[in-house]
Amino acid sequence: MKRLLILFIIIGMLTCTTFTSITVAQSRQRILINFNWKFTLDDSLTAEQPDFDDSNWRDLDLPHDWSIEGPYDENAVTGGSGGFLPTGIGWYRKHLTLPYDAKGKTVWIEFDGVYMNSDVWINGHHLGNYPYGYNSFHYDLTSYVVEGENIIAVRADNSQQPNTRWYSGSGIYRHVWLVIIEPLHVGHWGSYITSPEITESEANVNIQTIIENDSDSPKNCSLITKILDADGKEVGTATSKTNIPANDNKIIPQTIQIAAPKLWSLETPRLYKAINEVREGKRKVDIYETTFGIRTIEYNTEKGFLLNGEQVKMKGVNLHHDGGCVGAAVPERVWERRLESLKQMGCNAIRTAHNPPAPEFLDLCDRMGFLVMDEAFDEWRIGKREHAYHKYFDQWGEKDLIAMLHRDRNHPSIVLWSVGNEIREQTHENGHELLRKLMEICHREDPTRPVTLGCDNIAADGGATTLPFLELLDIVGYNYVDRWHERRELYFSLDRHSHPNWKMIGTESISVSSTRGEYSPGDDPNVVHLQMPRNLIRAQELWKVVKLNDYVIGDFIWTGIDYLGESWWPRKNATSGVLDLCGFPKDGYYFYKSQWTEEPMIHLFPHWNWQERQGQVIPVFCYTNFNAVELFLNDKSFGEKRLEFPRQGTSGGWNRYDRPRVNPTTGDLFLNWNVPYEPGVLKAVGKRNGEVVFTKEIRTTGNAAAIRLSVDRHVIKADQRDVVHVTIEIVDPDGNVVPTADNLVKFTVEGGGKLIGVDNGNPRDHNSYQISERHAFNGLCLAIVQSTKKPGKIRFEARANGLKKAVIEFEARNN
C-alpha cells in the first residue's frame, strides 16, 4: 500500500509536465498524454531522430487540427471537398518520461485518430505506418522505451489531395494514450460482451476475454470477471483458471447470469460495467474495465426495428466528424451539446457518415440513448477522389474493418454496421463478391448485428446497383430512395412488392435545409418572392411514407449538422444540416421537431423586419404539432389553418370518429399564410379542441443596442479539456434579438480559460476561427472557451462599437 501511495505521488508530480488523466488499477495505467507536444508544419525529414532540435517548434496540446487554423483559399488543393482549407505534412514530437515502475512492463501507445498516413517513431525506432485517418490504432513500445526521457515522433501526411469526402482535418486530431501493464494482461480491445439470452427475470451475459502473455515463460493465471450495475453494485461474477503459453494469448469464455436485468433503451440508457481481474497466483496483475448495455435488437420485414421487443422507428440524422470552428479536434462537450439539441428535436439515431467516429462520441451515444449505424468506408477499390482510401483498401481494408468492429462492438448504442457509402462497386458485375467478404468479416467478428450499406444507385439510369449486391445485404440501405423516376412518388413500395423479404432503411435522405436566418425577398422591389424552404415538400412526403409503413426501419436525413466541405466558393461548408456550424437550430430543425416530438411547439418564420416592404405580401410559414393554429398580426386575425397527420378514418360506425374532427385546410405537414407586411407583432396560437393552449410570437425589432450573453453551463472541469459555449446575441432596447444584425463583436477571456474557437454559422465568412472577434450573423455568434489547469472564475467579455457590452462569469473546478 505504501508503494502504491509513493507511485501516486510520483505520478502526480509528473503530471505537471508529462501526464494527466491517469487511471491506475494495480499495475495497469492508462494515461492521457495530450499535453505539451511540439509541432511544425514543415516536413523536417530527420525529425524522427531523438537528438533532433525541436526547441523552435510550436508548443501545443492535443487533439490538434492544423487545417482549421486556415487560411481559406479559393485555390487550395483541397478544393470545395475540404472546405478550401490547407493541408500538407506536419510533425509532432513528445518528450516523455515514464513512471519509475515501467521497467519490465508492457507499454503501448494508443492513437484514437491521426489524419492521415501517419508514421510513428519512439527513440528513433519506426513503429509503423497507418494510412487510414479515421480509425484508432496502437503500437507496442516495450522493446524501445528507456529510463528517463523518451522521444515520440509522429509524421502526418495529408498533402496528397483530394483524398476524402468531406472535410477531414489534419494531424493528431483525437486523443493519445499511454498504457503501462504487466506482461500478463488483458489484450488491446480484449473483452467482447454479448447478451444472447434475455428475459425479464434473467440475462445471460457472455464475455470473451483475450489474455496475453508477453513474457518468455508460460503463466498460470485466474480470470475473475465481475459485473457492476450503474450504482456500482456487484450483480454477477465468474472465475476461470488457465495457462497461457510464453509470448502467446488465449481467449477465455465466461457466462454470468444477471437477475432482473435493467435494459438499455432510448429513454433509460442503463449501462453495466464488466471488470476483468487477472491474477497470477494471489497477485493481481491487471484490471480491465468494459462498459456495456443489455438489450435485444431485432429487424423484421413487417415491423421494421424492435428494441427490447418494442417497435422503434429510427428518426435519424447523418453526421460528419468535424465540430465547426474547432475542426476535427472536437472536445467531448461540443458533441454532447450538439447531441442534446438533436435529442430535443426528437432524433433517436445517428449514422456516422462516412467513417468511424471518435470513441468518446460513441460513449455519449451510449449514455444519452441514441441508436447508431457505425460506418467503415466511403470507398473500396474504385476511388471517388484521386488520393483517397481506394489506394490502401487491398492492403488495409480487412484490417481497418476489424479494428472498427473490435473497438466498437461493446457499445449498446450501435445496432447496425455499415461497410460503405455509395460504393462504386455496387454497379459492377462482381461487386457483390467484395461485399460478401466484408459482410463475412462483420458476421464473424460480431454476429449480433446486421450489416447494411448506403446504396445511391438503386434503379439508377446508366448503371444500377446489381441485384446480387442488394440481395447480399442484411438490411438494404437506400440513399435518396425517391431520386429515380416514379420512385419520387412510390419510394420503397416497388421493391417491397418485388422483394418482400428485404429489410429496408433510408440510409441517406434529403432534409429541410437552409442557411440559418437567411431569407431573400427577391430582386423585385415591388413584390416579395420569398422562396419555399428548400426541399420541404420532398422531405415531408418522404417522412409520411417512413412513418406510416412499419416495414421501413427508419430514415437518416442529410444532415443533422452543417459540416465543412462539400462546398462551392465562396461557401466553405454545406448547409444541409438542421443545426448550423455553431449548433444553432435552423428552421428545418423545427419541422422535424414538429413531427418527431409531442412537446407542444410552434415555430414561425421568416423574421418580421421587412420595413422596406411595407404593404407587400410576406409568406409566413409555421411548423407545429398542433392541429389548429390561428395567426394574428397586431391582434388582427388572418384566419385559422388546420392540419392532421395521419388523418383519422371512421371508427365504430359510419361517420363516427374517436377524436374530434379537424377538417384540415392542407394536406401538408406545415401551415402558411400570406400576410401584407406592417411592423408589429406576429402571433400564432395553437389550439386543441378549440382551446388555446400555446402561443408563439415574433416581432419587428428596433435597432441593435446591446450584447446579451448566455452559457450552456456555469461550472466546468479545470482539466484542460472541458469547454463552455458562450452564445452572443445582438439585441434591441427591449431585449429582442435583431435578426439582421452583423456587428463585429470582440471577446476577452480572463482567468482559467482560453478561447479555442469563434463562429457565426455564416458559410461565406472566411475569417479565422482562432482570432478573438467575429461578426454576428443574423443576430448571433458563438465562442468556445476551454478550461486550463487553473481553477476559479472565468470572465468572458464581449464588446462591439455602438453597443452596450456584456460580461458573463462561469467557474472551473478541480473536481
Image (cartoon, rainbow, N blue to C red):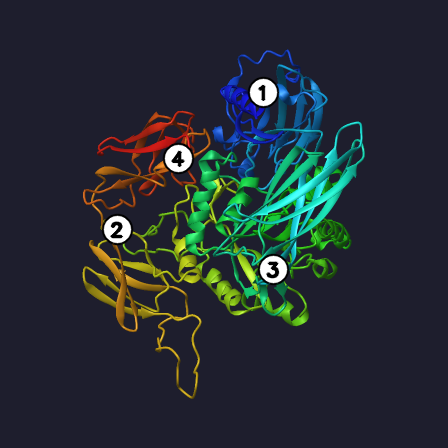
Can residue 358 be seen at all in this image of the molecule? no
- For marks 4 and 1, give the CA distance: 27 Å
Residue in view at x 26 percent, y 51 percent: 610
Residue in view at x 37 percent, y 77 percent: 659
The three-letter code of the residue at mark 1 reads Lys
* Nearer the camera: disc 3 or disc 4: 3
Q: Quadrant of residue 37?
A: top right
The three-letter code of the residue at mark 4 reads Ile
- For marks 1 and 2, give the CA distance: 57 Å
Residue in view at x 45 percent, y 29 percent: 719
* Nearer the camera: disc 4 or disc 1: 4
Residue tagged 4: 716
- For marks 4 and 2, give the CA distance: 41 Å
Q: Does residue 95 lie above or below 407 as drawn? A: above
The three-letter code of the residue at mark 3 reads Glu
Q: Residues within 10 Å of mark 3 (few under 14, many from 20)?
A: some
Residue tagged 1: 94
Where in the figure is residue 146, as x and y percent of width and height? 67, 17
Residue tagged 2: 610
Residue tagged 3: 202
